[in-house]
Image (tube, rainbow, N blue to C red):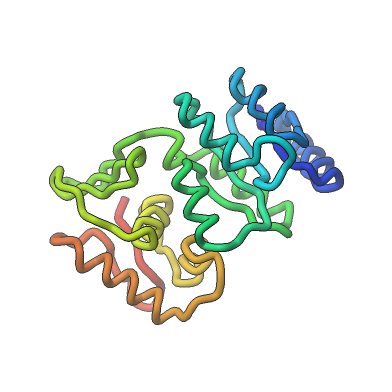
């Protein structure tokens, strides 16, 4: 497996590169977005690990430019940005996941292995079939109910995408906090937002697993 790693902080770049090399993964590391884009454009990578704030083209711009050219390599952002708008922007550009700095290298291993193994939401299919009634259009970020578009807010889209990413498993309130909001938020508010989304659906798609969280069946 071949990974492109964009990170301008020298110590972190070397540490991550050595760690992934020890796992048997080939890593090409870059400290400049322009050089990383050129390498990614040439192809041959199984995964992109992208910092956002780097010299030259930033991580967001890099992924946007690749997606506009139909280069659908799975991508993870490694960044200190935690504001929900930054998280939304990254997912809308087509990343699989976020790793927030500072992070443990074991967490990096888990997320990288998952991204390499799983079907990354935006890097693969444009239409994901959820059941006989619902499909999710990953290109236009829209939920379709028997072919008709359901209007969703940004937060509702992020909730839905978190559930799709973990389809078949229960997503806890704590996981929603991290993946959707990126910060501490009142659990009651999270449940309110999820219930608003559920009320927009005529058929049961999102299941409440009492005491544990919510899920979409595989």
Q: What is the tally of numbered marks visible in this picture?
A: 0
Identify whether 104 is placed above or below 124: below
Which residue is drawn at the image coordinates 55% and 44% (left, top)? 114
Q: Is residue 161 left or right of residue 178?
A: left
> Image quadrant for the N terminus?
top right
Residue at image x 50%, y 71%?
A: 174
Is residue 110 found left or right of 169 in the rendered image?
right
- Where residue 73 sits: x, y (%)? 53, 31
Q: x%, y% of residue 7?
A: 74, 42
Q: Give left or right: position of 151 versus 138.
A: left
Foreground pick, 130 / 146: 146
Q: Is residue 109 visible?
A: no
Give the percent coordinates (x, y) of residue 192.
33, 76
Tell me where residue 128 sits by quadrant.
top left
Q: Which residue lies at the image location 20% right of the left edge and 68% below the top edge? A: 199
Please indicate, yes or no, whether residue 29 appears anywhere in the rendered image. Answer: yes
Rendering quarter of residue 24: top right
């Amino acid at each position: 497996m071949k990974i492109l790693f964009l990170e301008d902080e020298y110590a972190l770049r070397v540490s991550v590169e050595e760690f992934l090399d020890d796992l048997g993964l080939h890593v090409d590391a870059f400290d400049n977005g322009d050089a990383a884009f050129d390498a990614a454009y040439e192809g041959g990578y199984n995964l992109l690990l992208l910092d956002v704030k780097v010299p030259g083209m930033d991580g967001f711009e890099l992924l946007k430019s690749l997606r506009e050219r139909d280069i659908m390599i799975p991508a993870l952002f490694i960044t200190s940005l935690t504001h929900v708008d930054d998280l939304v922007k990254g997912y809308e550009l087509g990343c699989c996941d976020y790793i927030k700095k500072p992070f443990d290298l074991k967490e990096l291993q888990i997320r990288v292995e998952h991204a390499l193994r799983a079907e990354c939401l935006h890097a693969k299919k444009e239409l994901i079939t959820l059941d006989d009634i619902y499909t999710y259009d990953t290109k236009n970020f829209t939920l379709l109910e028997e072919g008709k578009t359901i209007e969703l807010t940004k937060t509702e889209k992020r909730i839905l995408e978190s559930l799709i990413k973990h389809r078949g498993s229960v997503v806890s309130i704590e996981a929603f906090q991290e993946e959707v909001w990126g910060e501490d938020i009142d659990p009651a508010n999270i449940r309110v937002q999820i219930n608003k989304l559920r009320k927009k659906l005529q058929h049961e798609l999102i299941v409440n697993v009492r005491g544990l969280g919510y899920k979409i069946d595989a």
